[in-house]
Image (spheres, rainbow, N blue to C red):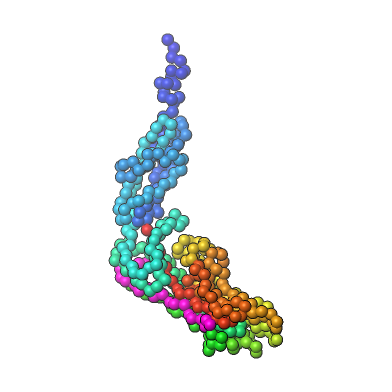
Amino acid sequence: MAIGPFLLAAIGGQGGIKVPGAPGTLSLGSATGSSIALTWSAPSDTGGATITGYRIKKDGSTLVADTGSTGTTYTATGLTAATSYSFTVAAINEKGTGADGNTPSLSTLAIPVYSQTNASQNTTYTYGGQTYQMLRWINTGTLTISANSASTQADITVVAGGGGASCNDAPGGGGGGGVRQLTGQTLTVGSSTITIGGGGSGYAGAVHPTGDGSSGNTSTFNSGAIGSSYSASGGGGGGYGSAARPGLPGGSGGGASAQWSQSNTGGSGNQGSYSPSEGNNGGNSAFQLYTTQMGGGGGGAGGVGQNATSSTPGNGGLGIGDVLYNGSVGTSASYDLFAGGGGTKGKGGYGVKWSYGGSGASAGTGAAGAIGMAGARNGRESGSSGSSSSGSGSGGAGGQTGGGQGAGGCVIIRWPV
């Protein structure tokens, strides 16, 4: 009796479909202390059916029975640091699981062993597929590295205290604290002291102060856990508002004040001292006989303080994004923006009310650093406290009866894990 075509198909097994061949070469890379990335290619022999997923084994045991995807990448997580792992991959179709491919091995990184004191944050986060260990200090503390066999390198940001602002007629805004951003710093066995510079004081409540706003203080990451010491300079104080005074120099320069006889120039920032620069210049004041006097805005780490005009006071310079925390600029969290320059309060012409104290934009706008403390408004209120979202190292804003205080600095470090 002749064998029919359907019986032949059955003998061949599901219309001739078979399990797939081995996938293309498996490669391992992008290892961290707890993960290894796998990359392979689809098998040239699909067994006559569509590939629906892949089985992945780790050290001979099944890690993933079926990925349920045609994707040819996978990241194994939850691994132990400084440990070698082997992997293999097999393709799956409707007939079943095919043969394993090659079996490469790779070791996870040796994560640095560390301890710290007084860090305000001690956490891990993932950005761009890379996981980081991050620490941030807003008060003086320490970092000790006791082992780093893989010579792991770190990124560091050092932010100084913002400058305080003066008060009275057309005062200058305080400059933002200087910012140093460093990459490729090898962690070394040893201990570092992290010193956080406080913000400069303003003249809150004083109708006739005796001078400029105080400059902010230096922040330093000393050598020990890293090979060299790095410092950022405090922001310059804003110019004294009862006399035409220039802004003070600093990491970012303070804004200049105006008086009835003249205008003046903003303080210089440390633009040429480091690459990239610590900050920018403060804004100039403006004077127009019988009509107006306006103070300049303090410089920021990301932008120059705005010059005053005959009609408006200067705004503070932009802040700089905390890219060491989340890799982006402008989210709403209080630590995401820092080192903006303080704005200033200006005086209109005869018969015009005192204008509001200016400021850098508040944190969360995605544009500028927050102020350390707001300036006075309407000429009769003392400087009021800044919002809880004020950025580290931000300069204070000038006010009629009170100058804002600069915000304190911070230090941030991260390394891959």
Which corner quadrant of the image does residue 192 belong to?
bottom left
Which corner quadrant of the image does residue 229 belong to?
bottom left
Q: Quadrant of the C terminus?
A: bottom left
Q: Position of residue 319 (x, y in %)?
A: 53, 70
Q: Front-most of 175 and 192?
A: 175
Magenta stretch in the rendered image: 186-205
Q: Where is residue 399 in the image (x, y as percent from the top left)?
A: 57, 80
- Does 47 sit left or right of 296 as displayed? left
Q: In this view, does 96 lie above or below 321?
A: above
Q: In this view, does 188 lie above or below 53?
A: below
Q: Position of residue 385 (x, y in %)?
A: 51, 74
At x 47% / y 71%, what residue is drawn?
Answer: 392
At x 43% / y 46%, what residue is drawn?
Answer: 73
Q: Residue furthest front?
A: 380
Residue 342 covered by magenta stretch: no
Magenta: main secondary structure equals loop
